[in-house]
Image (spheres, grey):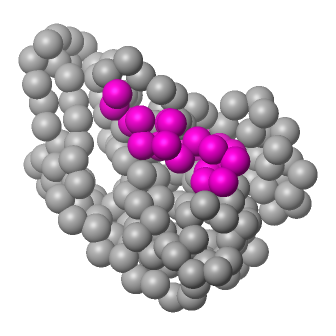
Amino acid sequence: MTDAISHFSQVPWCAALIEDLAWTPTRTASRVPKPTTEDSFFAETLGTDRTIRQCLTLRPTVPERDAPDYREVRTIVDLGTGLNGHPNICHGGFVATMLDEVFGVLITLNLAKKMEKPRMEGSQLNAFTAYLNTNYKKPVPTPGVLLITASFVKQERNKIYVSGTVEDGNGTIFSTAEGMFIETKTKL
């Protein structure tokens, strides 16, 4: 994470986000290789100099008083040209994939906090994408640094609704999305 902070601190709008005391850099769990092969797509396949060159997630420094603990995350990515669908334009399917992944980052942070509660002992929580509606506003240029946001909308029983954006950090929104995830609980 230190390398990513150093890398993104060179970009003025990223530095402003990193230095904002309301936000804390946190581990992007899906960027860590696991022996189970879980997250191998983001941790290994997309962890190259031509794909996602660096990645840093920021979460609110102070959790909410009620659930969910985190209502938003911001993930900064530095994309290479290995994700292009057209010259210097990111593949649209990958834009949707980034949104899905950052939605998962937000949900995973909240599920991890929920697992800390005593009533959850002996259980494992997961969430799976039920749908993702993506709206493309402008082509996403590559190579370049992007900000992907994910915001909690609501939860109804085991259905978690989120929304988010892909933007350039200076106000240009390239894509928006909304999604629903299904929370599952299994006994360990």
Q: Is residue 110 visible?
A: no
Which quadrant of the figure has residue 171? bottom right
Residue displayed at 34% across by 61% down: 162
Q: Is residue 111 magenta?
A: no
Direction from residue 33 to residue 157 in the image, left or right = left
Residue 52: tell me if it is visible. Answer: yes
- Left or right, 121 with respect to 85, comes to left
**What residue is shown at x 52% (from left), y 76% (from top)?**
85
Residue 138 higher or lower than 93, as above or below: below
**The quadrant where residue 88 appears:** bottom right
* Residue positioned 78% across, 39% down in the render: 5
Q: Position of residue 45 (x, y in %)?
A: 49, 43
**Residue extent of the magenta highlight:** 37-65
User: Toward the viewer: 120 or 26?
Assistant: 26
Instruction: Look at the image and tell me in which quarter the C terminus lies.
Output: top left
Residue sitting nearer the eye, 8 or 32: 32
